[in-house]
Structures are given as C-alpha cells and as structure tokens.
Image: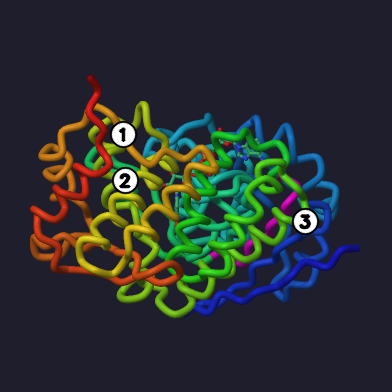
Amino acid sequence: MNLPEEIEVAAKQSYPVYLGAALEELGDYLQSLPDKIQHILVISHKKVSDLYLERLVKGLEDYRVDLLTVPEGEEEKSLERLSRLTTAALDCGADRKTLVIALGGGVIGDLAGFFASAFMRGIRFLQVPTTLLAQVDSSIGGKVAVNHPAGKNILGAFYPPLAVWTDFSTLNSLPWNEVENGLAESIKHALIDDEDLFAFFETQADSIRQRDPAIWREMVTRSTSIKIRIVSQDEREQGIRRLLNLGHTFGHALETEMNYRGVTHGQGVSIGIVAASYLANAKGSLTLTEVERIKQLLQRYDLPTSIQKQDPQTLLRRMQTDKKNQGGRKILVLPQGIGQAVVSEDCTDEEILAAWHKIIVENN
Ligand SMILES: NC(=O)c1ccc[n+]([C@@H]2O[C@H](COP(=O)([O-])OP(=O)(O)OC[C@H]3O[C@@H](n4cnc5c(N)ncnc54)[C@H](O)[C@@H]3O)[C@@H](O)[C@H]2O)c1
C-alpha cells in the first residue's frame, strides 16, 4: 500500500488532507474514525461516478451506500438542485448520522458541501476531488456554496469537511481544457507564494503536458500545500487568504462580460494574472522582464495572455460590482516579484484601465 501524505488544515475545526490516497482505501480511513458511520450518500456526476464509483465502493462494503447524481454544469449549483437533493436524500433514509461524500470537481464539492451544511442543520461530509482545480484549490479551505440569479456563490458557508481524500489517478481521465483550469490556479499559487514552484512549472512544462505521473504528483502536492498553508493562517479571508484572488477580479469581470461563454474560468484567471502583472509593473513592484516571464509560462500551457474585441471602460465598470471591493474601493492583488504578492487598495481607475489596455488586442 502506498501511504498517502497527510497534511492538516488548521482551522476552527481542523481536518486532514490525504494526498496520494487510493479511492479503494477510503473505507479503512472511515473505520478508524471514533464516531461510527452506517449510511453514506455519494453525490457525483454520472460521468464521474461511471468512472470511479466502483473503485470507491470497494472499500465501503461495510456501509449502506446510496448514489445521487447531479447533471453537469455550473447552473446545477442552485437552490432548485439543493431541494431535489434533499428529497432524494430523505427517500434514501438519510439522517443526521449520514456521511456525504462529494465525488467530483468544484461544482460537486461546493454543492454537496452546502447540502451537507444545511441538511438537518449539518451532517458530516468528505471531499473526494477529481479535477485538478478541485484537488489544488476548491476542496481546501472549507468554502461551500450555491449560486443565485443575483450572482455566483451568493449563498454559502464555511463548512470544513471531515477530510479531503485526494487520489491523483483520477486526474488521468480529465480532458486538457479542464486541466487548464487547474493549471491557472496552480500557477497563481506559485506566483503568490513559491518562486521555486514557479521555476518547476517552467522547467517541467513538457513533462506536465505529457502527464508524467511523478511530476504531476509533485505539482499537485506542492500546489495544494500552498493553499493549505494560506487558508490555515486565515480561514475567514480577513488577511493573507485574499492573496488567492490574484487575477480573479480582472478575470471575473471578463467572464461576466462574456456571459461565461468564450472564456473559461482558467482562461479568465490567466488573462487576469497578466493584467494584474501589468498593473504591478505600473506600481513598481514587478519588472517588465518579470511580466514577460509570467506571460511566457502561461503561454507554455496554452493559457491566453490577451483578449480581443473588449471595451476597457465596460470591463472597468464590471469590476465595480466585485464582491471583494470595500467601501467603493477596488481591492486588487498584485504580484511583487515572482513568489510574492500584496493586496493593494490604492489602484486608481486610470491605472486599472491602462492594465486592461495592455491585454486587449485590437482586432482589425
Ligand atoms: N469552494 C472553493 O473554495 C472554490 C474555489 C475555486 C472554485 N470553486 C468552484 O469550483 C467550480 C469549478 O470546479 P471545476 O473546475 O472542478 O469544474 P467542474 O466541477 O464543473 O468539473 C469540470 C468537468 O470535469 C468533469 N470531471 C470531473 N472529474 C473528472 C475526471 N476525473 N475525469 C473526467 N472528467 C471529470 C466534470 O464532470 C465536469 O464536466 C466552480 O463552481 C467554482 O465556483 C470553488
């Protein structure tokens, strides 16, 4: 047996993250818990459960296991879906002792986690992330949510899981466009916290693109460790955790303006990182050589560093409604060299507009 690496997330209610765990061995872990479990509800997409449920339930023979599948897509993170899950869970005889297992990417993790936080005032849940984004980012940090017509993740909670059970082998079936979403976040982690990891992304680009298992193991472990380190210091996003928003204020403006079509979240973050880098250059915390280095790295993974046919003024207005803003001021994260970042509250609209201009290419 290949023992997983265990890293504790320090929080009001701490929990372990098992990196390199095997799906089949989850049952052994559950057996070791003091509070016994009888009933398990696995929440997943059909596609993901077709791929991985059989392996997961191999270790769960001692439990009564029910599977609830949810259709794909961000729009399924909704109150309607929550209500349907509740009905289906009650039909399966779920009660306050039931354990919810979220088997999937960030959509499943956020939805199943929010369901677990509310069902009978809160039941236990465990994250089994199967996308790169979920492994390095969304399964860590305790945020769970559903969307509302007024905005993304408007209804949510901090609801730490019992544990995060990360089996790297589930990433083998992930399509490359989904890999890109996770890579954008992983590169962001390196840029804000770890210059060595940034250099690793530069030197190992070919191996990463070829999905070399040892290199992926290292990439996921190092990237996840950064997220764990940051959220362990600031569970409620009052300070250092805000650094994780690098690229997101620009990226969200772009995603909303394009109606979530034509640009994926990872692409939005990638372009957002470049815009933030130009802004950091204007503020004197990043050299142009470093901006170029960041762009080149993103391009090596086919992540975009510019966008066509957008109006900077409209995008600036979109940034006005970002939920991270405070008292009308735009809160932006700016790289400070490679491997560090700062939260800036004093960027002027002119400076932000200039950054947008840098990444928008005219389409003649
Ligand atoms: N809670 C947080 O802290 C946090 C952080 C970042 C993002 N998020 C949320 O995460 C969501 C995005 O997550 P995502 O990028 O994982 O997308 P996703 O959950 O929609 O998954 C993307 C696609 O990959 C498929 N898939 C999942 N695992 C697979 C596998 N192993 N093999 C093949 N296909 C697989 C899914 O079925 C889906 O079609 C958004 O809703 C976002 O708001 C949450």
Spatial distance from mark 1 to mark 3, Cα to Cα? 34 Å
Spatial distance from mark 2 to mark 1, Cα to Cα? 11 Å
Q: Position of residue 233 (x, y in %)?
A: 44, 80
Q: Which disc is residue 214 wearing?
A: 3
Q: Is residue 353 magenta?
A: no
Q: Which residue is mark 1?
A: 307
Q: Secondary structure at mark 2?
A: helix
Q: Does the residue at mark 2 contact the one at mark 1 (Cβ under 8 Å)?
A: no
The image quarter containing residue 172 is: top right
Is 159 drawn above or below residue 58 in the view shown?
Answer: below
At label 2, the amino acid type is: Gly
Q: In the image shown, does 255 or 350 lie closer to the viewer?
A: 350
Q: Find out if the beta carbon at label 2 lies less than 8 Å from the nearest ligand 1 atom.
A: no
Q: Which disc is residue 122 wearing?
A: none
Mark 2 neighbour class, 10 Å CA radius: few under 14, some 14 to 19, many 20 or more: many
Spatial distance from mark 3 to mark 2, Cα to Cα? 31 Å
Instruction: Please report whichever mark, 3 or 2, sits nearer to the chain's N-terminal start.
Output: 3
Q: In the image shown, does 355 or 154 lie closer to the viewer?
A: 355
Q: In the image shown, does 355 or 262 lie closer to the viewer?
A: 355
Is 37 drawn above or below residue 7 in the view shown?
Answer: above
Q: Is residue 273 left or right of residue 349?
A: right
Instruction: Give me the residue at 45% from left, 70% from top.
Output: 339
Instruction: Please report whichever mark, 1 or 3, sits nearer to the chain's N-terminal start.
Output: 3
Tell me the quadrant of the picture where the C terminus can be found: top left
Q: Is residue 83 visible?
A: no
Q: Secondary structure at mark 1?
A: strand
At label 3, the amino acid type is: Ala
Give the magenta part as a residue range.
161-170
Q: Residue furthest right?
A: 1
Q: Is residue 167 left or right of residue 315?
A: right
Q: Which disc is residue 251 wearing?
A: 2
Mark 1 neighbour class, 10 Å CA radius: few under 14, some 14 to 19, many 20 or more: some
